[in-house]
Image (spheres, grey):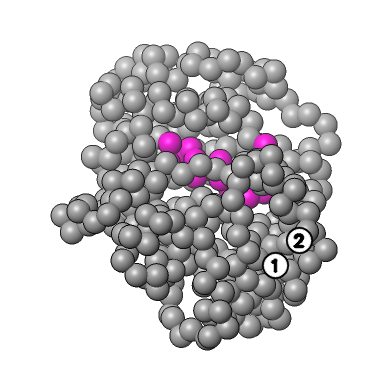
Amino acid sequence: MSGEFNLIEKYFVNRQPQRKDVLLAAGDDCALVKAPGNVEIAVSTDTLVAGTHFLTEANPAWVAHKALASNISDLAAMGATPAWVSFALTIPEVDEAWLAPFCDSFFKLADYFGIQLIGGDTTKGPLSLTLTVQGFVPEGRALRRDGAKVGDWIYVTGNLGDSKAGLEVVLEPEQNRAKPYALELEERHYLSVPRVLAGQALVNLASSAIDISDGVIADLKHILKRSQVGASIDVSCLPISPELCQFTSDIASAQQYALTSGEEYELCFTVPEENKGSLESVLSHTGTKVTCIGQIRPVEYFELHNNGEPLSWRLTGYDHFKAN
């Protein structure tokens, strides 16, 4: 890319304080970092493509937040402490009106979670973003998907379904922008808050965990498959915001949004009976709302019910929207 190094120097270099564990962040072929002892390093990579994960005309500050938050959420689901990020940006041309708010938002979120950008690449081409985040988790204590046991309780953080409603506003503004709280829900689609503190608090308490990127009904099934168990979900317990209820206009629709909404970046996790009583006190310092929505059952058993009344809803998880 013409002016590649000028672009990197202007927008990405010397934007943050130097972490003590970063020995070399820029200026050579590789970054050099030093991990403390008795930890494991959690690594996650995601790509966001214009027209698939966000519209090209979307607010660049919101796009930056969404890109980094989605990766940080993967670390949160493992109970990890974020540390470093590498970022590869493919962009059609150097557009300073787009880059300036994008980078301001990117570094604001990175600084909030103590993450330092340690390297990456810039390339000319269709707009896409690839991030690799790394963090620390105490040795042998990472939250995983394969630890759920029959009898464990199923919990989620935050509210569910808002992101799906916000996405409908993004994709069909003429039809949905006049609905109650449409603008607020659109913003929530982009500006999720990774549950890092909650994930860290759940280490040694939860038996399994996953972040909700494809909808709780789809992501929970990843836990069920890896743990070889089943589940019973009471939809009357799903945490739903008042704004979503008014947007959808009926509770059953709001419950279905809550089950299938992707890109929420809340956590779904399981807790053994003996740890259930400790959950509220352990999470009290995080300010995170948690809700019990069901219980783990024997393998191949999966049930949705409403206060004990079976439901026959056939629901699938979130699918990234396609380019026009």
* Relative vertical location of residue 208 with respect to residue 151 in this rendering, above or below: above
| Quarter that holds the C terminus | bottom left
Residue 247 percent across, percent down from the top left: 31, 59
Q: Mark 2 points at which residue?
A: 276
Q: Name the residue under label 1.
A: 153
Mark 2 crowd level (few <14, some 14–19, many ≥20, 10 Å Cα): some
Task: Please tell me how crowded label 1 is: few (under 14), some (14-19), or many (20+) other residues with Cα within 10 Å.
Answer: many
In terms of image quadrants, where is residue 129?
A: top left
Q: Does the magenta stretch include residue 75?
A: yes
Q: What residue type is labelled 2?
A: Lys
Query: Would you identify the image quadrant in which residue 36 lies?
Result: top right
> In this view of the protein, can residue 78 be seen by the observer?
yes
> At numbered mark 2, what does the secondary structure look like: helix, strand or loop?
helix
Residue plotted at (32% across, 54% down): 167
Of helix, strand and loop, which one carries label 1?
strand
Tag 1–tag 2 contact (CB < 8 Å): yes
Between circles 1 and 2, the one closer to the viewer is: 2
- The rendered magenta stretch, by its main secondary structure, is classed as helix
Q: What residue is at 78 percent from the left and 59 percent from the top?
A: 277
Q: Nearer the viewer, residue 218 or 189?
A: 189
Q: Is 191 on the left-hand or right-hand side of 295? A: left
Q: Give the range drawn in magenta.
A: 65-81
Question: What's the residue type where badge 1 is placed?
Answer: Trp
Q: Assess whether residue 301 is covered by the magenta stretch.
A: no
